[in-house]
Image (cartoon, helix red, strand yellow):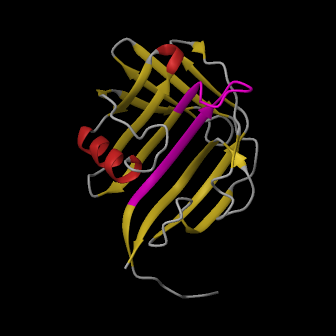
């Protein structure tokens, strides 16, 4: 067993939950949910959910910690060119985990009169990733326990959002192959190399 160590600073540690759905033949998501359940960052801990659901008129950041929401947007989103890389209103919310982590974990976001629920069904064994981040930045390493799935749901006010998981190639250079657009990462830690 290797005892090699690296010099690094912890940038972020927590869970990252992703549920991106598309209708067949479409080029944009019918629903995009990206939840950062932060256990450690320089902005503290809490939960930040970036949500875009066009048919429900939702394009916002929901959070229980506004300072962390700003940090998450600036450190994890801004300049990456993904669907969340634009100005979004920040909304105070209650974000809660439910379901069985071994079978069908879920997140519920409640703010004012809005309730959004995202559910992941475990369909594949965990994949362990240790190495460069999918972003390709050489000065950032990531450790993550990833659960990819092709079986998820997304509802707003109890109404299902039409769409399904689709294949993404962002993991090809780090863990190989195209992977589902729906995944959750447990025990994820981003390290800035010294």
Give x and y (percent) for residue 59. Answer: 42, 25
Residue depicted at x 40% and y 47% = 77
**Image location of residue 89, percent across then percent down:** 30, 28
Left or right placement of residue 134 versus residue 91 in this view: right
Q: Is residue 57 above or below residue 167?
A: above
Q: Nearer the viewer, residue 8 or 137?
A: 137
Residue shown at the point (47%, 39%) measured from the top left: 35
Q: Quadrant of the C terminus?
A: bottom left
Verify whether residue 52 appears in magenta: no
User: Which of the 4 quarters of the picture holds residue 41?
Assistant: bottom left
- Residue 187 image offset from top left, x and y in percent: 52, 57
- Residue 37 sits above or below residue 107 on the image: below
Camera-side residue: 23 or 193?
Answer: 23
Q: Residue at x 64, y 31 (%)?
A: 27
Relative to 133, 77 lies left or right: left
Instruction: Name the quadrant of the N terminus.
Output: bottom right
Residue 122 percent coordinates (x, y): 71, 40
Magenta region: which residues?
12-32
> Which residue corresponds to the image point at 43% horizontal and 26% vertical from the top-left?
109
Quadrant assignment, res 177: bottom right
**Occupied quadrant, residue 127:** bottom right
Is the residue 26 above or below the residue 77 in the image?
above
């Amino acid at each position: 067993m290797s005892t090699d160590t690296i010099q690094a600073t912890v940038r972020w540690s927590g869970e990252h939950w992703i549920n991106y759905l598309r209708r067949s033949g479409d080029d944009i998501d019918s629903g995009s949910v990206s939840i950062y359940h932060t256990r450690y960052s320089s902005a503290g801990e809490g939960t930040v959910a970036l949500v875009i659901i066009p048919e429900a008129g939702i394009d916002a950041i929901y959070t229980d910690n506004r300072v962390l929401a700003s940090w998450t947007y600036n450190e994890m989103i801004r300049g990456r060119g993904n669907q969340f890389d634009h100005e979004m209103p920040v909304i105070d919310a209650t974000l809660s985990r439910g379901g069985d982590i071994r079978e069908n974990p879920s997140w519920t976001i409640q703010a004012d009169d809005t309730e959004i629920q995202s559910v992941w069904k475990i369909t594949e064994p965990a994949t362990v990733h240790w190495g460069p981040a999918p972003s390709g930045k050489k000065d950032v390493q990531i450790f993550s326990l990833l659960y990819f799935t092709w079986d998820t749901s997304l509802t707003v006010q109890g109404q299902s959002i039409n769409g399904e998981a689709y294949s993404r190639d962002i993991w090809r250079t780090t863990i190989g192959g195209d992977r589902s657009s729906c995944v959750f990462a447990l025990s994820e830690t981003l390290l800035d190399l010294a």
